[in-house]
Amino acid sequence: MKLVGLVQIRKKKGYSQLKVAMDLSISREALSYYENGKRSPDVEMLCKLSQYFNVSIDYLITGKEFEEQ
């Protein structure tokens, strides 16, 4: 599954893939795979990404905040 929001928030903050990967102690390739849908992060990594960017996990996946209906 492609993490649409991850790409959006990373670019919005002006961070390179390398910076984010180094800050989270993962490879740049792993981050690229998450962004392009070649690999899915586990729940622990989703939580780390959510905290790092201060956005919800829902936002990382869809690019939109969760809305109650």
Image: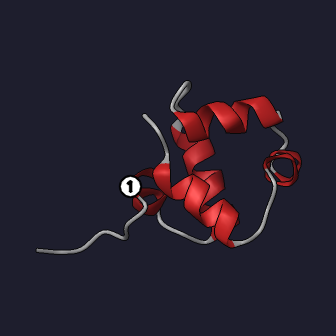
Name the residue furthest left. 69
Compared across the picture, whether 22 is left or right of 62 comes to right
Disc 1 is placed on an element classified as helix
Q: Residue at x 51, y 32 (%)?
A: 37
Q: Whole-percent x and y of residue 58?
A: 39, 58
From what the image shows, is residue 57 above or below residue 18? Answer: below
Residue 67: image quadrant is bottom left
Q: Residue at x 50, y 58 (%)?
A: 5
Quadrant, the C terminus: bottom left
Instruction: Give 45 or 29, whichever is nearer the viewer.
Output: 29
Q: Whole-percent x and y of residue 7?
A: 59, 54
Compared across the picture, whether 32 is left or right of 23 comes to left
Q: Whole-percent x and y of residue 48?
A: 65, 53
Does any portion of residue 41 appear in the rendered image? no
Q: How is the image coloured?
A: secondary structure
Name the residue furthest top. 38
Residue 6: image quadrant is bottom right
Q: Residue at x 79, y 62 (%)?
A: 15
From what the image shows, is residue 28 above or below residue 24? Answer: above
Q: Whole-percent x and y of residue 20?
A: 80, 53
From what the image shows, is residue 55 above or below residue 19? Answer: below
Q: Residue at x 63, y 54 (%)?
A: 49
Q: Amino acid at mark 1?
A: Thr
Q: Which residue is mark 1?
A: 62
Does any portion of residue 54 appear in the rendered image? yes
Q: How many marks?
A: 1
Instruction: Give 50 or 20, whichever is nearer the viewer.
Output: 20
Quadrant, the N terminus: top left
Instruction: Give 62 or 25, whichever is nearer the viewer.
Output: 62
Q: Callout 1 environment at 10 Å: few (<14), some (14 to 19), or many (20+)?
A: some
